[in-house]
Amino acid sequence: MRRVKGNDMITVNGLPVELNGSRNLLEFLNEQGYDQRVIVIGLNDKIVPKGTYPGIVLKDNDVLDVLHFVSGG
Amino acid sequence: MKTLNNRLVLGEHEFTSRFILGSGKYSLNLIKAAVENAGAQMITLALRRANPGGEENILDFIPQGVTLLPNTSGARTAEEAVKIARFSRELGCGDFVKIEVIRDTKYLFPDNYETVRATEILASEGFVVMPYMQPDLNVARDLASAGAACVMPLAAPIGSNRGLQAREFIKILIDEIDLPVIVDAGIGCPSQACEAMEMGAAAVMANTAIATAGDIPLMAEAFKNAIEAGRSAYLAGLGRVLENGASASSPLTGFLSAAD
């Protein structure tokens, strides 16, 4: 994805996403419409404890994994 | 009497149900009925990437009070399994984990060596570890030493519905391992689940057999009944089998001969 005006780029679940301005993790997840009751977040390969999202400001090249439970045996 | 201790104990947790239900390959809308008809107190889940937006989530379809058993499906190494388990626990759904480490893509056999390694790490972190394994006595002993809460030998290749193909090897685990032996994978119909329980399995896990049935909730109920019947038969002690000949069940005297 091409950067616009030097905006920060992050990777979310393997796909590039452009950040339109500064965002903390909570703001970003809300903006994307994730149901926070049912997700767990990995940031640069580390688990992010629930409750710490507002204090984490996303930055260029961050790699985010947004995971949840699905059916399985 | 054996029935006094008729609970399945996993770590610090006790269950009266001996049927672990898988949630894969059928509609979320059928999960509640399947769980209820199965009498299941534990259901498996997998962890995957979520899509943005308000998609349906399986947690909203599982009845309250049912213990969640996240699996580590998708893991090819112990390290990947450990990572998945840690993520799952962060979701706040308890300490249980079913370890699945699979590298083989044709038969989907679990990798016993990686499974032992993952068990050792996760047990030391306080997980209740339920490892899916190929039935092998040495590996089962290693899993017990590593802190597993049970062992989960496959009966046949996963999803095959071919039944208790590994019967002899599972029986050895039941006889030799001092942990619950939970038969997982390959059980295709209630009679096979019943047979596993009759020979002393502590529980049965089934998914595909239910998911591919014509009537999912009804098949869940059939499995429940079969597993309970098999457990009762095990506790009762099966009758002996004659090598040869026959043994009359009625007195051998002629119908009126005793009075003649």
Image (cartoon, coloured by chain):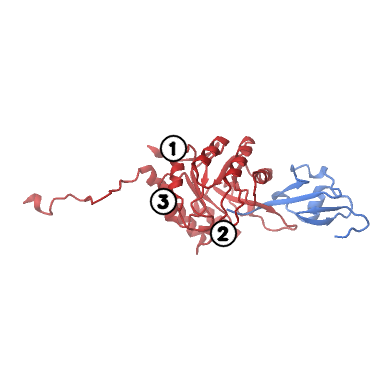
Same chain, marks 1 and 2?
yes
Say if residue A37 shows up in the picture: yes
Furthest toward the bottom, the residue is B214
Residue type at the position of mark 2: Leu
Q: Nearer the viewer, residue B168 or B18?
A: B168
Q: Position of residue B257 (x, y in %)?
A: 9, 52
- Which of the chains is red? B
Q: Chain of mark 2?
A: B
**Mark 1, mark 3: which one is toward the viewer?**
3
- Where disc 1 sits, the SS reads helix
Identify the residue at horizontal 43%, vertical 54% (top origin).
B192
- Sequence-earlier tag: 1 or 2: 1
Residue type at the position of mark 1: Asn
**Residue bearing mark 1:** B5
Snapshot quadrant of residue B107: bottom right
Q: Position of residue A28 (x, y in %)?
A: 81, 52
Q: Is residue A35 left or right of residue B113?
A: right
Give the alpha-carbon distance from disc 2 to disc 3, as whole Å. Answer: 27 Å
**Residue bearing mark 2:** B30
Q: Give the number of the disc on residue B254.
A: none
Q: Is residue B235 left or right of residue B39?
A: left
Q: Give the number of the disc on residue B195.
A: 3
- Where disc 3 sits, the SS reads helix
- Where disc 2 sits, the SS reads helix
- Which of the chains is blue? A
Q: Nearer the viewer, residue B130 or B221?
A: B130
